[in-house]
Amino acid sequence: MAKKMALISTKGTLDMAYPPFILASTAAALGYEVQVFFTFYGLPLLRKDLSGVKISPLGNPAMPMPMPIPVAMQMLPGMESMATMMMKQKLKKHGVATLEELRDLCLELDVKFIACQMTVDLFEFDKSEFIEQCEYGGAATFMGFAGDSDICLFI
């Protein structure tokens, strides 16, 4: 019987989008059956277009910067876009796959993506914005799988 890994993705910033896709694709490549439950701010990671995913330097004290930037400056307009651009350049320079590539790899490896129906309703998302390969369900849908998983992570 294959091992199972259950992930809960709750954040949709660039830095928090990578862990669920990397862990899910790696586990699936190792033969695990994997499901990812996307809820609240993690749900936008199922949108067809991921180009709007950004990183925020504000409130992220561990983020390595080329030079120390005071917190007050991190609030200035354009800092989020600048930090996102810098991070994307760093990812590319080091040959790290894009979010789209990682998500596609997960789908190729049969990782199951579950979009939280309650969150879809709460934030009045239009399902046409999301990739066709995701399923919709509530916590109970996911808990059936997570309860039998070998690894369950909240990201």
Image: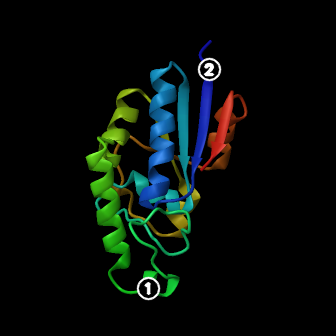
- Position of residue 99 measured from the top left corner of the image (x, y, whole percent): 35, 48
Residue 120's place in the image compared with 56, above or below, is above
Q: Furthest-front residue in view? A: 67
- Find residue 101 and name its label: none
Q: Quadrant of residue 82?
A: bottom left
Write the residue at 73% across / 34% down. 147
Looking at numbered disc 1 in the image, what kind of residue is underneath it?
A: Met
Q: Quadrant of residue 119?
A: bottom right
The reply to whether residue 19 is visible in this rendering is yes
Q: Which residue is mark 2?
A: 3
Q: Quadrant of residue 127?
A: bottom left
Write the residue at 45% across / 84% down. 75
Is 73 displayed left or right of 142 in the figure? left
- Position of residue 6 measured from the top left corner of the image (x, y, whole percent): 61, 36
- Find residue 73 and name its label: 1
Is 35 displayed left or right of 66 in the figure? right
Of residue 74 and residue 107, the one placed in the foreground of this image is 74
Please name which of the two marks, 2 or 1, marks the residue nearer to the observer.
1
- Position of residue 137 measured from the top left corner of the image (x, y, whole percent): 56, 47
Write the residue at 32% across / 73% down. 81
- Dot 1: few (<14), some (14–19), or many (≥20) neighbours within 10 Å? few
Of residue 89 and residue 80, the one placed in the foreground of this image is 89
Q: What separation in Å lies between label 2 and label 1 (alpha carbons)?
A: 47 Å
Q: Secondary structure at mark 1?
A: helix
Residue 17's place in the image compared with 79, above or below, is above
Q: Secondary structure at mark 2?
A: loop
